[in-house]
Image: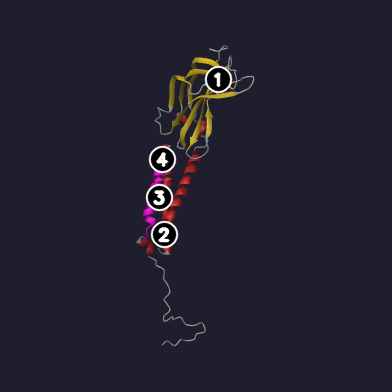
Amino acid sequence: MDYHGQKLSENLFYYIIILFGSIGWIYGYILQDFTYVFYSWSVGVAISIVLCVPDWPIYNRHPIKWLESIPDRDESDDEGETKKNK
Amino acid sequence: MHTVWVRLNAVVFFGLTVLLCLSILAAISKIGHASRHKPVIHKLDLKTLKSLKNHGGVDRALLSFDLHADMNPAFHWNIKQLFVYVVATYATPVNPKNQVVLWDRIVEATDPPSKKVIDERDVFVKYGLVDQGADLRGKEVELRLMWDHMPLTGALYAGEQEAEGASKFALPGEYQ
């Protein structure tokens, strides 16, 4: 998962869990039953796990641009002496 | 957030933190409920005194009582169960205030509203009225209903019947 993907994944599960939790809380408050809070919360966590944990393609749209490898890099000495191979 | 395991850990523990906050908010939402909604104690009276005897220097009275109490108003979404008990209070020269539990019952939030009303006649005591000494004869005993609220989130807190509504009876002057 690239950096943009990680950020997207994290924001997504923050919003999902808080949203499901809050809606469940309001419904539970009206009905005076905490069970609704718990069920709504667990649905939110389940959805978040499916959406945010696996390495889905949407999370790999900004792959890290690595630098080009430097060509012909042998184990040369620090002094810069060139080795003459046989 | 760089491996599946790190992300799974993040989601699960964030979820648990949110659940903790929701639980605490639910508890806060019900502060003051107990003072506004009180169970209705219709009746708590002595029915019959079966015996008042002395065993090994210790007095014990066995009796039955009538109880009719509606515990529904005490319940709200942060209550798991109520621990309801009948208390007998009396005074002796040795101990100015004695409180003895005669009977108890657990009333759960998952019980139907009809089961949250305790309506029983001629209930025999679960635990005898036992004195620390031999001072029960002729004493006036007050019967009072008390209960503990056991919340889902938060500390246990007590509730009790109004003092004015509590019934009293006198124990006989002689053993019987």
The residue to which callout 4 is attached is A35
- Label 3 chain ID: A
Q: Position of residue A55 (x, y in %)?
A: 37, 60
> Which label is found at residue B50?
none
Identify the image quadrant of the N terminus of chain B. bottom left
User: Foreground mark, 1 or 2?
Assistant: 1
Q: Write down the residue under mark 3.
A: A45
Foreground mark, 4 or 2? 4
Mark 2 → mark 3, Cα distance in angstroms? 16 Å
Q: Which residue is mark 1?
A: B142
Report in which chain the residue with disc 1 lies.
Answer: B
Taking the spot 43% from the left edge, 26% from the top edge, the residue there is: B117
Q: Residue at x 40, y 47 (%)?
A: A42
Determine the secondary structure under disc 4.
helix
* CA gap, disc 1 and disc 2: 67 Å
Quickly name the residue at label 2: A8
Mark 4–mark 3 distance (CA, rounded to whole Å): 15 Å
Q: Which residues are magenta?
A: A38-55
* Picture coordinates of residue B169, whole percent (x, y): 54, 16
- Badge 3 marks a residue whose secondary structure is helix
Give the residue type that dot 2 points to.
Answer: Leu
User: Overall secondary structure of the magenta stretch?
Assistant: helix
Of residue A47 and residue B97, the one placed in the foreground of this image is: B97
**Parent chain of label 2:** A
Q: Residue at x 47, y 35 (%)?
A: B79
Mark 4–mark 2 CB contact (< 8 Å): no
Query: Residues at marks 2 and 3, common chain?
Result: yes
User: Which residue type does callout 1 highlight?
Assistant: Glu
* Mark 4 vs 3, N-terminal side: 4
